[in-house]
Image (cartoon, rainbow, N blue to C red):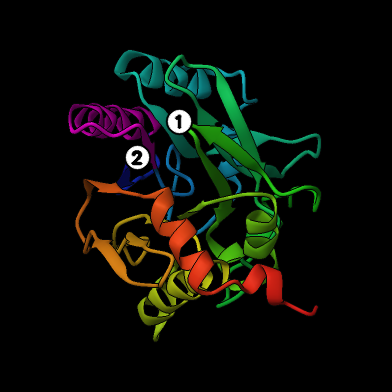
Amino acid sequence: MRIALGQLESGADIRANIAAIDRFAAEAAHDGAALIAFPEYATYEKKKVDATFPAVAEPLDGRVCRELADIARRHRIALVAGVVETSEESGRAYNTLVAFGPDGGRLASYRKIHLFDAQGFGESEFIKPGPSTAPVVFEHGGVRFGLMTCYDLRFPELARSLADAGAQVLLVCSSWVPGEHKTEQWLALNAARAIENSVYVAGVCQAPPVSVGRSVLMDPMGVVEADLGLDPRVRTVEVSLETVDRVRESFPMFRQRRL
């Protein structure tokens, strides 16, 4: 299957962000991609999460998600993107990934569970964590995709639970905050999650300056199959279930683990 990584430079202009998503989806579909993944906070992003995030939040049947569904439908491509979703708590929203099929129907949604309260940031002040329930895996075109968001990458238990639930490709939609050694950690953690679970990892990140960029596809051996660098762009890449099966046969860790 061909999938696309859409490295955006999202800002506070929701209309401009959705227009960029539309352009990248069109390019990916033209290049034969069956799915395109966009970063965390794809439709609304700022240097720091603040009170404007819950103010712009919408339900998953609101205008923003209807427009994302329409983009998927028009271009006949599955689409995953980060949105700001209303919650039942005043003053806090959910940081949510939503997946649409090429018919515009919703395939899955995932509310980020590990919020970024680190490096002087306090995401949880304005964002409510999702429930720590069953891992979110959806199927498209015979491939099973698992959903993770940014800081989740530092918690290997979530990636393992997705692999246990049958995921063959992890979509790690992110806005990875810059800082000392942060790019190196981003690359290392994407590779680690791929190696330890024998899965592809598509780490899709916002471009600088809000984030580090460097969206990547890691194969199940942790080899970099694509690196988008620092600028906003879209890149179509190949994922092979035969490769997943071959690596899992060579390293049968799921049969051998003792814990």
How many numbered marks, from 0 up? 2
How far apart in space, not on screen, are marks 1 and 2 (Cα)? Answer: 8 Å
* Residues marked 1 and 2 touching at CB (< 8 Å): yes
Residue 128's spot in the image, x, y percent? 73, 49
Name the residue nearer the viewer: 120 or 144.
144
Q: Is residue 17 above or below residue 116?
A: above
Viewport quadrant of the N terminus: top left
Q: Secondary structure at mark 2?
A: loop
Instruction: Tell me the residue that label 1 is attached to.
Output: 141
Q: Is residue 118 visible?
A: yes
Q: Is residue 115 visible?
A: no
Magenta span: 14-37
Give the quadrant of residue 38: top left
Q: Is residue 165 left or right of residue 105?
A: right
Give the dominant element type of the magenta stretch: helix, strand or loop: helix
Residue at position x 33%, y 13% in the image: 74
**Kind of residue at disc 2:** Met
Specify the quadrant that holds the C terminus: bottom right
Instruction: Indicate which disc residue 1 carries.
Output: 2
Q: Identify the amino acid type marked 1.
A: Gly
Measured as percent of width and height from the top left, residue 171 is found at 48, 51
- Residue depicted at 29% across the width and 30% down the height: 25
Membership of 90 in magenta stretch:
no
